[in-house]
Image (cartoon, rainbow, N blue to C red):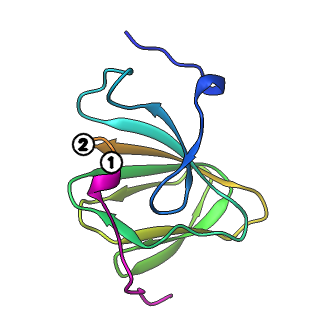
Amino acid sequence: MFKTSYGNISPFVTKDGSVIRELVHPGPAGSARQSLAEATVLSGSETALHRHHASEEIYHVRQGRGIMTLGGDVFVIVQGDSVLIPPGTPHRLRNSGEEALVVLCCCCPPYSHEDTELLDECLPEK
């Protein structure tokens, strides 16, 4: 069994520019096949366009509102929305609100910097 306390988890900045707290991840948590993290995108900020070659992700919006780019689609996300991001799909988040955009991110296999490719190519805004 593994239990962690939110206050004991130090945030860090990922390759895409979001501030992450890894809630459950391989290593001390003992998770073998998935990770769960909380990502925060500050008002007026966005993550870099990127993709993960192996990981499938699920984003669940806990707070705020934003614009999600997912492949060639661009759409609004708000508190309570969930989005499935298949492996290899370019994506990014832009905070379009005045409060922090807070998203739970579940990755399978677990998130890794090595599986994250930053993309120079810009997708069209819709």
Question: Callout 1 environment at 10 Å: few (<14), some (14 to 19), or many (20+)?
Answer: some
Query: Predominant secondary structure in magenta?
Result: loop
Q: CA distance from mark 2 to mark 1?
A: 9 Å
- Counting from the top left corner in percent of width and height, residue 54 is at 20, 54
**Disc 2 and disc 1 in contact, CB within 8 angstroms:** yes
Q: Residue at x 51, y 74 (%)?
A: 75
Query: Going by the image, does 28 lie left or right of 94?
Result: left
Picture disc at residue 112: 1
Q: Which image quarter: residue 50? A: bottom left
Relative depth, front residue between 52 and 83: 52
Residue type at tag 1: Ser
Q: Which image quarter: residue 107? A: top left
Query: Over which residues does the magenta segment extend?
Result: 112-126
Picture disc at residue 92: none
Residue type at tag 2: Pro
Q: Measured along the vertical axis of the image, is residue 121 above or below residue 99?
A: below
Q: Residue at the far left: name it.
A: 54
Relative depth, front residue between 62 and 17: 17
| Mark 1 residue element | loop
Question: Callout 2 environment at 10 Å: few (<14), some (14 to 19), or many (20+)?
Answer: some
Q: Residue at x 42, y 86 (%)?
A: 122
Query: Going by the image, does 98 lie left or right of 41?
Result: right
Residue 122 magenta: yes
Relative depth, front residue between 118 and 110: 118
Single out the mark in the foreground, 2 or 1: 1
Q: Residue at x 22, y 61 (%)?
A: 53
Q: Which residue is mark 2?
A: 109
Residue 28 magenta: no
